[in-house]
Amino acid sequence: MVILGGGQAGIQLADSLRAEGYPGAIDVFASETHLPYQRPPLSKDFIAEGADASALPLRADRFFSELDVTFHPGVTVSSLDRSARTVTTDTGEVFAYDVLVFATGARNRRLSIEGADLAGVHYLRTLDDAQELREELASARSALVVGGGFIGLEFAAGAAARGLDVTVLEQGERIMGRVLTPPMSSHFAGLHGAERIDIRLGEGIVALQGGGGPGGGRVTAGVGAGGEVYPADIVVVGIGVLPNAELADAAGLTVTNGIVVDAFLRTSDPSIYAIGDCCSYPNAHTGTMTRLESVQNAVDQAKVLAKTLTGTPIEYVELPWFWSQQGANKLQIAGMVDVAATTFTRGDPASGKFSVFCFRGDTLLGVESVNSTADHLAARRILGNRLPLTPAQAVDPAFDLKAYSRAAVAAA
């Protein structure tokens, strides 16, 4: 068994394979030299002032030895020979496989504008990224965030809490517009505004200015599409990611917004599978091909695939869910929210604790919850088990979502 990728998906797969009784050799190749670690805290707790500077490990140090898994840190697989069933690393070593699994994740989209390579311009995905950014935050006074998605806003909240002046440039009409309903986007815009984070909607960036010196020196400001200059000691870019699917594409596997897999997470080659951020799979809840950037998705796909690879084929039908911690506010999403669907609000947004239920007709599609874990967990049970729920029930404070969801699941 050869697993390409030492992130959440790859490590969970190795763990689950052994838990399911897989007896064969397992080789895990990771491009980073660090032991596998959790990525979500890097844009949240890790950058907070006074926070622990060490990464949170995915597993204990003894994980690989105890499970008899061979870990190859800092090794990139550069070519794949499907007919010979071998992979070759960037050091020239060749490894044979019976089953190959892509768990290669994704990488940041990068700016291609003047000044994009100046010192002080950061992307936030790896531990090295976070450590470098953390060091510079100690002396920075202002930050410019390009992109109003989860990563950008999580960083913005953390930087503002450290006392920096923060400006967010979002090219779209609203923040988190790709993943949230308009009411929830508006609510979070208000929360960030209350923390003196300056959010500029409909504003792109066309250049970054530096202070001179070798290579242009250090960034001093960003220039918006409208010509306005935004001074900044630090620039953090969060404009989305791209799936790491080039190796699969070069090997002739089907690639469309990620490595295309079937319901069993199998690629167009029956001995090769793909899981996590790098794959596009048939979503049982939407009926569409979907590529998700989510820890939940990576973990659940790995667990399901481990069963398939050990003799119990199972289709992947898990409900997607997500979360984001932005300052003191925890956002949780169950299901796939349709930004054009009809929304109904449960609870009072002014209280800071409420949920938005997203319906198409009488069909519940997804639920967004702010500081309301009980609503979120109930929504996951309701959506995951396809329990009926009407808009009237969703907004009725006397209707006990938690009791209904538990009773209905137990009855089923």
Image (tube, helix red, strand yellow):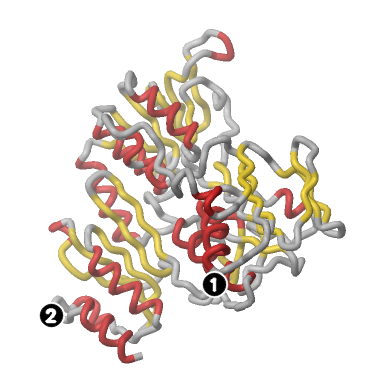
Looking at the figure, which quarter contains the C terminus?
bottom left
Q: Residue furthest bottom?
A: 411
Residue at x 24% of width, y 51% of height: 329
**Which residue is labeled 1 in the image?**
283
Which quarter shows the N terminus? bottom right
Q: State the image coordinates of residue 371 (x, y, percent, origin top left).
A: 22, 58
Instruction: Locate residue 247 relative to residue 291 in the image: left or right.
Output: right
Q: Is residue 118 visible?
A: yes
Q: Residue furthest right?
A: 83
Spot occupied by residue 251 in the image (x, y as percentages of width and height): 80, 54
What residue is shown with label 2?
A: 398
Q: Residue at x 50, y 55 (%)?
A: 293
In the foreground, 76 or 129: 76
**Amino acid at circle 2:** Ala
> Residue visible at 61% across and 43% down?
30
Compared to 287, does 92 lie above or below? above
| Number of numbered discs visible in the structure rendering | 2
Identify the secondary structure beneath mark 1.
loop
Find residue 144 and name its label: none
The percent coordinates of residue 344 (x first, y second) are 27, 72
